[in-house]
Image: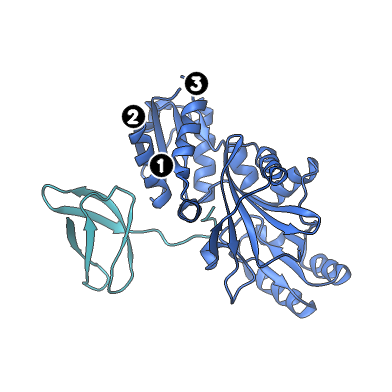
Amino acid sequence: MVIKVQCNECGGTIEVPDDALPGEIVSCPDCGTEYEVVSVDAKAGRAELKPAEEVKEDWGE
Amino acid sequence: MANAISILSDRLRWEEKALYKSALSMGLKASIVDAKSHTLDILDESSLPAEVRESDVVLQRCVSHYRGLYYAAVLERFGRLVVNSFSTSLISGNKLLTSLELAKRGIPTPRTYVSFSDDSAVEFMDRHGYPMVVKPIVGSWGRMVAKVDDRDDASIIVEFRRMLQDPTYQVYYLQEYVRRPPRDIRAVVVGDSVVAAEYRYQPPDDWRTNIARGGRAEPANLREDEREIMLKAAEAVGGGVLGVDAMETEEGLLVHEVNGGVEFHGVSRATGIDVASKIVEYVKSIARR
């Protein structure tokens, strides 16, 4: 099952799997904006997202 | 043996999810802790998240090098067991410190030089001859790694680096350009074993082999002497869970990097090896209780 959340950037529909874990990254299929999953309430069909951090110079392996 | 592990993360990738699922499937109590979500009091252990306090070991998996490094420092101050340790993360997260450790132990590695000013870097590269490779001392995914073919390239790189705010760009980590096949080898070392290895083929439009740059992975079977070099390189930075990169030359392998925050989705897919479970088994085995 997926939970639908509206993209703050473009109004597109982001589909969040209802088994997504906090910290997972989802992106808007329309504009590509990345969001981090804050919480998922599968029963209520609600997911809270926040804008994901942008890649920094010290990111990687 | 560990009963509970915490996975410290700041961006949950395929790897962290795989580790979490592996830990649960082994019957461990597992948690994922977001390093961005709280503040630690360095005098008060109770400021650590409850999941961390209740875990026997913390698997540090932040995508941000400095975030993970300094979080590990605080955890160790409270006597927590962290994989990778602060020291391993410090050394493996810095190409110069890594090269120094490899050199001290006589582990074969490309000839490496360091200049501390723009002028001396250009003067040295001119004297040494081209091509040369210039890398940031901290950084990953092949970012800002440049092949310098002549004096014009050298001058441009120096000019660009002068404009960057990060003062570490004034430390010039210079390496000989190694003639190698269009691939290198990545070995995932966990504790004292090479658990998986892959060839990373460079894409048609880049000389770098990083998967993040479009490199392609194929399984690699290492000879015993090659495994030995990979293990020694991992040990040189302090050991733990590491991605060791080496190039094939006529004189044998040359280790050019040891990565402390190894991503293993590609190598797991290429080899069919469950790297996440190998890591969790290792972490479980080293915990104090």
Residue B113: image quadrant is bottom right
Residue B194: image quadrant is top right
Secondary element under disc 1, as helix, strand or loop, is helix
Q: Chain of mark 1?
A: B
Residue B89 placement (x, y as % from top left): 59, 42
Disc 2: which residue: B27
Left or right: where does residue B194 sit relative to residue B32? Answer: right
Which tag, 1 or 2, sits closer to the chain's start? 1
In the image, residue B166 sits, relative to residue B153, either above or below, namely above
**Which quadrant is home to the N terminus of chain B?**
top left
Q: Chain of mark 3?
A: B
Left or right: where does residue B263 sit relative to residue B97? Answer: left
Please give the name of the residue rendered at 54% of the width and 52% of the height, measured from the top-left corner. A61
Looking at the rendered structure, the kind of residue marked 3 is Arg
In the image, residue B289 sits, relative to residue B95, either above or below, namely above
Marks 2 and 3: same chain? yes
User: Number of numbered discs present?
Assistant: 3
In the image, residue A43 sits, relative to residue B178, either above or below, namely above
Tell me, by letter, which chain the rendering colours cyan: A
In the image, residue A23 sits, relative to residue A33, either above or below, namely above
Disc 3: which residue: B288
Q: Chain of mark 2?
A: B
Left or right: where does residue A33 sit relative to residue B72? Answer: left
Residue B125 placement (x, y as % from top left): 82, 69
Disc 1: which residue: B19
Secondary element under disc 2, as helix, strand or loop, is loop
